[in-house]
Amino acid sequence: MLDNGTYDAHWKTQVLSKLLEKPPLLSHTYGFELIPLSEVLATHRELYDPEGYASIHPDYQVIPFGYGGEDGGHYCFFMNEQTSDGEAPAVYLDHE
């Protein structure tokens, strides 16, 4: 669902055609951009920063996985609502 391949000089010729055959769900959203795995922890810290735009209360457990739209919001897994089979709903944290 979230694997868009590695963005490099060959992405358009080697990866895009495969994605177009079976597009990931979130490729149909406006402005969705997957957060690189190497940046997830830093983004998580930003969301919980008391001085940041979101300043999420620690009781709410979210894991960011994408950026969205022109407003700079974040798509996150909402771990507080995780089901018994381990799935968590996706939520959008609006930047505004």
Image: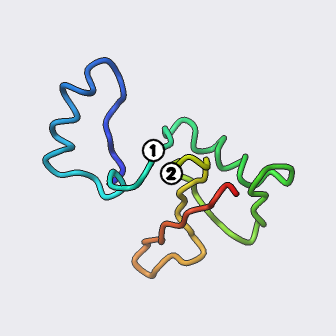
Which badge, 2 or 1, is on the more N-terminal residue?
1
20 vs 45, left or right, is: left
Q: Assign the N terminus to one quadrant of the image.
A: bottom left
Q: Is residue 33 above or below residue 95?
A: above
Q: Quadrant of residue 28?
A: bottom left
The residue where tag 1 is placed is: 34
70 vs 25, left or right, is: right
Residue lying at the far bottom of the rendered structure: 84
Q: Assign the C terminus to one quadrant of the image.
A: bottom right
Where disc 1 sits, the SS reads: strand
Where disc 2 sits, the SS reads: strand
Q: Position of residue 95 (x, y in %)?
A: 67, 55
Taking depth in this image into account, of 72 and 36 the one nearest to the observer is 72
The answer to whether mark 2 and mark 1 are in CB contact below 8 A is yes
Give the amino acid at mark 1. Leu
Residue at figure coordinates x 50%, y 42% from the top left: 35
Taking depth in this image into account, of 20 and 87 the one nearest to the observer is 20
Residue at figure coordinates x 57%, y 69% from the top left: 79
Q: Position of residue 49 (x, y in %)?
A: 80, 51
25 vs 71, left or right, is: left
Q: CA distance from mark 2 to mark 1?
A: 6 Å
- Tell me if mark 1 has few (under 14), some (14-19) or many (20+) residues whose alpha carbon lies within 10 angstroms of its own: some
What is the number of the mark on residue 43?
none
Q: Position of residue 47 (x, y in %)?
A: 71, 52
The residue where tag 2 is placed is: 65
Q: Quadrant of residue 41?
A: top right
- Tell me if mark 2 has few (under 14), some (14-19) or many (20+) residues whose alpha carbon lies within 10 angstroms of its own: many
Q: Position of residue 9 (x, y in %)?
A: 31, 17
Give the amino acid at mark 2. Phe
